[in-house]
Amino acid sequence: MTERLSIEALIAMDEHLSEEERSVRDTVRRFVRERYLPRAGELFAEEKFPTDLIPEIGAMGLLGASIEGYGCAGMSAVCYGLSLEELEYGDSGLRSFVSVQGSLVMWPISAYGTEEQKERFLPKMASGEMIGCFGLTEPDSGSDPSSMTTRARKDGDHYVISGTKMWITSSPVCHLALVWAKVGDGGAESVRGFIVERGMDGFTTPTVHGKMSLRASPTGEIVLDEVRVPVANMLPGVQGLKGPLSCLTQARFGISWGVMGAARACLDSAIAYACERVQFDKPIASKQLIQGQFAEMATEIARGKIMALHFARLKDKNGKISSVQVSLCKRSNCKVALDIARGCRGILGGNGILLEYPVIRHMLNLESVYTYEGTNEVHKLILGLALTGHNAF
C-alpha cells in the first residue's frame, strides 16, 4: 500500500495563497479542531449553540471580517472565504452564525447606515458583544420577497412595524434584528431596512423547535406587533429589494466557500473509515467501487474550491462580483457538498447515521444550506435569465 494523499495536497491550493491567507486559514482551522469539534456531536444532539465561543470568534476578526474600520478586521475576500470553509468543516451552524452576523447584518449597516448607526452597532457586533439577525423571509414569502406582508407606517419620529419573519438564524439570541418591511410614502410602497432592538415593545423572537437540520444553530421567528422603531434606526442608504438582495449576495458568496469545508469533512471521515473497515478480508478502501466514489468526490471538491478562489480573487480585484456569478458558485458548490455528504453516508453504512462520525450531521445540515438564501431552483432561474435574457420567474 502506498502513502495516502490528502485532498488538500491533491489540489495544492497553498501554491496560490499568500502567507497571510494561509495564516488566517490555519488559525481558524486550529480553533475549530481544538474548541469546536470535540463537542460538535453533543451540540447537534442537544440543539445548543456554543455561545461561550463567540468572544473567541470575535477576537479572530471573523465577525464583519470584510468591513474596514469600526473594530472590524478588513479581511480580503479570500481570507474571509478560507475562514468560512474552516468553520463549516466544524458545522454549518457555526459558519451560519458568522455569515449572518457579518454579511446580513453588519454589512448593510456599513453599506447603507448612518455614521451614528455604524459607530453605535458595528464595534460591539465585531467583538461579539452584540448579536444580530436578518429578517426577510416570512411564513408565506420565501423565494419571492416582494410578496412580504410586514409593513411599517410613519408615526411622528417613529415607524410602527407589524409582521412576522420566519426561519431566522440567531433570532432567539439576538440583541437586534435588521428587519425589511414595506413602507407606504405618498401611496407608493418601498422596501426599507430597520434596526429593531431587543426590549422594544411588541418585539419577540420565539424559537423554532423540531429541526432535524442545523440543530446547533439557534433558529426562530421575529414577531413584530406594532413595534415603535425610531426614525433614526432606519437605514437611509437604500430603498427597494436592492437592499436585502445585495445582503444575500454577500452571504451567498460565503456559503459557496463554507460548504466545501463540510464536503471535505465528510470525505476525510469516509476515507479514514474505509481504510479501517475490513470486509471480505480487505479494507473496503481497496475496492474499486469505493475508490471510484472517492475519486469523483475529490474531483468535485477541487472544482468547487478553485471556482470559489477564482471569484474571491475577482472580488478582491474589482471590489465586487455579480450576483449571477455568486448564484453560479453557490448553487454548484451546495449541490456538490450535499451529494458528497450523501455518498459518504452510504460508504459508512450503518455507522453513517451515528453522531460519532460527522457525516450524518453535515448531511442533515446541508439539506438546509442547499435551500436557504436562494433555493437550487431559484439560482438556476437566475442563471437562465442571465444566459437567455428571458425571465422565467
Image (spheres, rainbow, N blue to C red):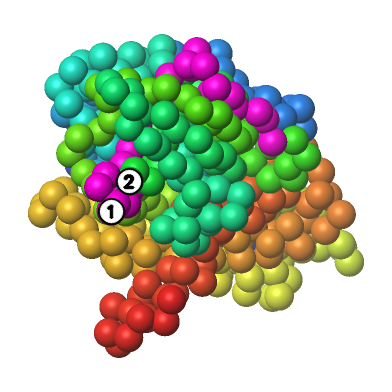
Q: Is residue 51 above or below residue 166?
A: above
Is residue 161 part of the magenta span, yes or no? no
Specify whether 115 is left or right of 363: left
Determine the residue positioned at 60% across, 60% down. Answer: 338
Determine the residue positioned at 27% across, 21% down. Answer: 157
Q: Is residue 377 above or below residue 198?
A: below
Is residue 195 part of the magenta span, yes or no? yes
Q: Which mark is residue 188?
A: 1
The count of marks equals 2
Q: Quadrant of residue 99?
A: top left
Amino acid residing under circle 1: Ala
Report the residue marked by disc 2.
184
Residue 285 screen position, x and y as percent: 70, 62
Amino acid residing under circle 2: Gly
Please report contact status of discs 2 and 1: CB closer than 8 Å, yes or no: yes
Quadrant for the N terminus in the image: bottom right
Determine the residue positioned at 28% across, 53% down. Answer: 188
Estimate how packed mark 1 is, as few (under 14), some (14 to 19) or many (20 or more) residues with alpha carbons within 10 Å. few
Give SS at disc 2: strand
Residue 203 screen position, x and y as percent: 53, 23
Q: Magenta region: which residues?
A: 185-208
State whether residue 54 appears in this view. no
